[in-house]
């Protein structure tokens, strides 16, 4: 008989520690190395090797991953570079002009986190885990970070109960028994059931915002809807097709600093069974501040990005994703090759993360713009309003720096400032480019023409927040005025 699902003496933190019927000398079925027959986005993992950050001989990047497991290119592999002394937009544009037919080089590193993957486990009542052959498996959760104010709890356990999951973690031997220490838990019912996805175009441009404002119920799987198909009457042949996607994370329910949400651009291939856990998320965060959730800006697999028990976005807020299924991988390769160069500059502090002028939205939109996808701008919140806000905040807080910060926010282009605006603008423009509605009022660039010719389908995904000790999150703010209206008057809160 195994231990109880929760060790109540440990402040309610789950131990998920149960009896196992596999010997310590033999790994349970379904467990493999993190780089065994896997993909990182568009790239097979056979060209990578695992290293701890502190052991990797990299030019600066590894300093941010001292105690973390990363995947780095094997010796002799072509690795993305960058041009010294050149701004990131110019570097990407120059690279793209000469690299359109070249294979995708490898990134300098990918944040993997865990050395092992458990492919198929079934979560029984009470938190017992069964492997693919029906044997019980000892599973324990990685501990919460000291700065992580809430964590996996009893409602989380109930959410996973009765589901099949894929987990990243570490295999250990304790008292002669095998133990899988789980860091990431990914429900396999998140997979897209490609052939049964509902096809329902937007009834109007405002409906996209409405869909993101609607609460996402806690249910099995994710909520997906096809917005456009090139051949709507044909059988969907999307397996192993490349994708270019944009993921938008909502507002946290207990942190008003997060009301703007977060955004990242994603590349990968649809799995044979609709799996997308191995897509590569290009995640920009501030390098110079320590995240209470343990987030490090990096290229990271989707299951880590969304479902890591400490840093996973889904434990803090709902998310939304726009997926473009491609007939040719060139547009996805173009973005991934460009963003890998930008990461090389970012890790060397050739530019710094800035919440107004170079945040996750601004950096991502800049890369797309450099490649040739010119997402229509919405303009700043208002220059005169920015000037008035500068004076008001400076006087109220007795700080010219605070006034200047407010001015920068309100005077910045909204698609570069607000993740929700960037997401909405990109989604609507892509639908125009492929001909779903009225064509864009501009001459399309070479990259935009590739999108027009290569996109086979566009679908929207709404991903529920995983229940835990966290407050329920919501949609992100779609304007600076909305952001300000939702922030507590007492900034200490």
Image: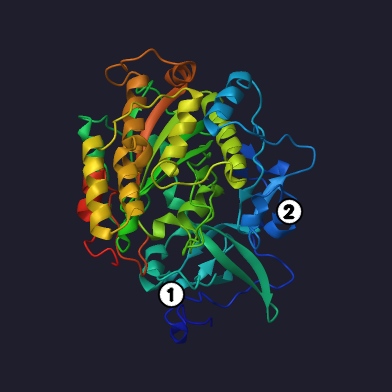
What residue would you read off at disc 1?
A: 126
N-terminal of the pair, mark 2 or mark 1, is: 2
Instruction: Single out the mark in the foreground, 2 or 1.
Output: 2
User: Considering depth in this image, is 369 or 196 the residue closer to the camera?
Assistant: 369
Measure the alpha-carbon separation of dots 2 and 1.
41 Å
- Residue 77 visible in the shown view: yes
State the quadrant of the C terminus. Answer: bottom left
Residue at 45% x, 22% y is 451
Q: Position of residue 17 (x, y in %)?
A: 54, 77
Q: Position of residue 318 (x, y in %)?
A: 34, 53
What residue would you read off at disc 2?
A: 56
SS at mark 2 in the image = loop
Q: Tag on residue 190?
A: none
Left/right placement of residue 217 relative to residue 134 reads left
Left/right placement of residue 472 relative to residue 339 reads left
Q: Position of residue 439 (x, y in %)?
A: 31, 16
Q: Position of residue 82 (x, y in %)?
A: 64, 34
SS at mark 1 in the image = helix
Left/right placement of residue 87 relative to residue 237 reads right
- Residue 35 visible in the shown view: no
Left/right placement of residue 271 relative to residue 318 reads right
Q: How many numbered marks appear? A: 2
User: Considering depth in this image, is 179 or 372 the residue closer to the camera?
Assistant: 372
Q: Residues within 10 Å of mark 2 (few under 14, many from 20)?
A: many
User: Considering depth in this image, is 332 or 240 the residue closer to the camera?
Assistant: 332
Residue at 65% x, 67% y is 171
Q: Is residue 408 above or below residue 305?
A: above
Residue extending farthest to the bottom is 9
Q: Residues within 10 Å of mark 1 (few under 14, many from 20)?
A: some
Residue extending farthest to the top is 443
Residue at 21% x, 34% y is 206
Residue at 57% x, 37% y is 342
């Amino acid at each position: 008989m195994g231990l109880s699902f929760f060790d109540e003496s440990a402040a309610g933190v789950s131990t998920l520690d149960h009896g196992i019927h596999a010997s310590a000398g033999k790994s349970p079925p379904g467990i493999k190395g993190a780089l065994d027959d896997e993909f990182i986005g568009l790239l097979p993992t056979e060209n990578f090797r695992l290293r701890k950050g502190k052991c990797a001989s990299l030019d600066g990047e590894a300093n941010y991953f001292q105690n973390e497991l990363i995947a780095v290119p094997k010796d002799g592999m072509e690795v993305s570079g960058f041009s010294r002394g050149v701004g990131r937009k110019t570097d990407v544009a120059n690279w793209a002009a000469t690299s359109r037919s070249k294979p995708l080089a490898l990134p300098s590193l990918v944040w993997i986190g865990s050395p092992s993957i458990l492919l198929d486990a079934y979560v029984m009542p009470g938190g017992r885990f069964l492997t693919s052959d029906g044997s019980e498996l000892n599973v324990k959760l990685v501990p919460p970070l000291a700065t992580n104010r809430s964590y996996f709890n009893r409602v989380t356990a109930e959410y996973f109960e009765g589901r099949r999951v894929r987990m990243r973690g570490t295999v250990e031997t304790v008292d002669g028994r095998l133990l899988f220490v789980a860091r990431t838990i990914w429900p396999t019912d998140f997979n897209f059931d490609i052939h049964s996805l509902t096809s329902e175009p937007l009834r109007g441009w405002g409906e996209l915002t409405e869909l993101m404002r609607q609460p996402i119920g806690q249910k099995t799987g994710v909520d997906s809807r096809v917005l456009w198909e090139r051949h709507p009457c044909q059988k969907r042949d999307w397996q192993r097709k490349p994708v270019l996607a944009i993921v938008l994370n909502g507002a946290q329910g207990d942190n008003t600093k997060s009301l703007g949400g977060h955004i990242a651009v994603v590349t990968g291939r649809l799995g044979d069974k609709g799996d997308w856990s191995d897509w590569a998320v290009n995640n920009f965060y501030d390098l110079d501040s320590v995240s209470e959730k343990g987030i490090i800006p990096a290229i990271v697999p989707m299951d880590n990005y969304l479902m890591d028990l400490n840093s996973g976005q889904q434990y803090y807020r709902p998310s939304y994703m726009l997926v473009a299924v491609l007939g040719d991988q060139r547009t996805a390769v173009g973005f991934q090759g460009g963003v890998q160069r930008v990461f090389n500059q970012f890790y060397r502090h050739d530019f710094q993360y800035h919440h107004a002028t170079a945040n996750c939205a601004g950096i991502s939109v800049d890369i797309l713009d450099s490649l040739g996808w010119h997402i229509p701008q919405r303009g700043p919140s208002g220059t005169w309003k920015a000037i008035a806000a500068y004076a008001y905040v400076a006087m109220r807080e007795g700080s010219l720096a605070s006034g200047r910060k407010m001015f920068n926010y309100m005077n910045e282009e909204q698609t570069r400032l607000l993740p929700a605006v960037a997401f909405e603008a990109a989604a609507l423009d892509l639908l125009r480019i492929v001909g779903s509605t009225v064509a864009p009022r501009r001459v399309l660039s070479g990259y935009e023409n590739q999108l027009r010719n290569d996109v086979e389908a566009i679908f929207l995904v709404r991903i529920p927040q995983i229940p835990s000790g966290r407050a329920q999150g919501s949609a992100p703010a779609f304007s600076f005025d909305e952001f300000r209206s939702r922030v507590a008057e007492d900034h200490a809160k």
